[in-house]
Amino acid sequence: MEHSIALVTGTTSGLGYEAARTLAAEGWREIIVTGRSLARVQETAAQLAAETKKQVFTPLELDLDSPSSVQSALARLVKQGNPIDFLLLNAGMVPGKERVLTAAGIEAAQAPLIGHHQLTVGLLRAKLLSPNARIVIAGAEPARGGVPMFSYTDVPAFAAKHFGGDRTAAIEALIHNRPNVKYVPNTTYADAKLIIAWWVAALARRLPSGMAVYAVSPGAATATKASRRAGLAVKYLFIPVANLIPGMNQTPETAARRYLQASEFGTDVSGEFFASARGKFSGPIEVQRQPHLHDRASQEAAWQAVVKVSGADLSYRGSLTAVSGGSGRG
Ligand SMILES: NC(=O)c1ccc[n+]([C@@H]2O[C@H](COP(=O)([O-])OP(=O)(O)OC[C@H]3O[C@@H](n4cnc5c(N)ncnc54)[C@H](OP(=O)(O)O)[C@@H]3O)[C@@H](O)[C@H]2O)c1
């Protein structure tokens, strides 16, 4: 891909900051960096410019919890009018002990996907993604299962028990953390990342040919602020243990490089979820093959649930070439 314009969300700390820094080092012409408040992201952009000695950072206010903030950000991008080549949807969080809902009633760890969806749909509708654009969204290993203390909800069973088998309604409930959902922070995080993996597969089927989208787990990078709200067991047990086991942790720079690596992948693997090898949280990334990730009914239910909660849909299917490639398996 020609190194031109990238947009990275959640750059005020951690992997988003590292990704923006690395993109500059690799010669990207403009890197739009986002943060919840303009003042903070302006500070971030200035810090990045000082560190890299490159004047390529454009600060943009974007609070993914707020539809009006997403709309304002979109309006600014439309005014600027330059198509984005690499859309890196990195912002996310591990939720804390107490359940937090946004003003729109969305659970806080689920909210970034809703804002990212509104942003992505807005950019597609405004034709502000370049024809070969790459979209990468932050996933995480708990979405595939087998991560101690982080189990995901069995959506088909949950839907059968409480929603007459309606998976869209069940996923909507997970996004709102109600009804019939008991708040368990680590499960909420795993569910948020599972819904992201499904959303990616469904989006891949709707993108114009030439574009591609992937969910990418950066892997464990415990030096970021990701677990600032996490419970004591995660902070004082899970992370210290992971830090002690060789190969279970990596630097933020190494983790952020996974996103950049994926930005070079082809359309043949659009819709896939890339993460560490089974049982690992670092090292090379590979396509995740667990059957639940490739369940087409769940992928489409996740898409429909996100459309309903966000109020944003791609209504251009007739006017742009929709492709059925990507992770349509399942
Ligand atoms: N670090 C890891 O071990 C690890 C492992 C797997 C996956 N991940 C994923 O990697 C991504 C980056 O995490 P990180 O480790 O870099 O954590 P971090 O240091 O906490 O950075 C997260 C960034 O996202 C922003 N953000 C979160 N929610 C937002 C919202 N609703 N609206 C706007 N900005 C929001 C944060 O801004 P504020 O400070 O304003 O909240 C911050 O800039 C996340 O999606 C995380 O789930 C991380």
Image (cartoon, helix red, strand yellow):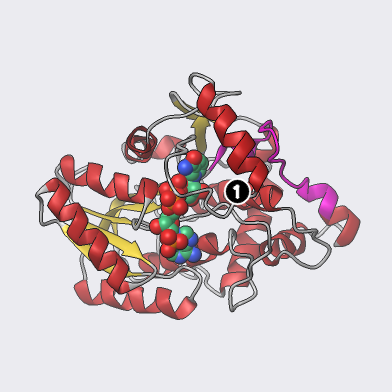
Left or right: 239 in relation to 135 = right
Q: Start and end of the magenta stretch?
A: 140-158
Front residue (pair 288, 237): 237
Kindly identify the residue that appears in the image at 18 percent across and 51 percent down: 4
Front residue (pair 53, 306): 53
Task: Tell me the residue that label 1 is attached to.
Answer: 198
What element does badge 1 sit on? helix
Kindly identify the residue that appears in the image at 31 percent across and 78 percent down: 75
Kindly identify the residue that appears in the image at 37 percent across and 38 percent down: 252
- Is residue 234 at all visible to an observer of this figure? yes
Kindly identify the residue that appears in the image at 53 percent across and 60 percent down: 113
Q: What residue type is labelled 1?
A: Trp
Position in image of residue 330 (x %, y %): 66, 38
Q: Is residue 112 magenta?
A: no
Query: How many marks do you count on the picture?
Result: 1
Q: Quadrant of the image for the N terminus? A: top left
Q: How crowded is mark 1: few (under 14 residues within 10 Å), some or many (20 or more)?
A: many
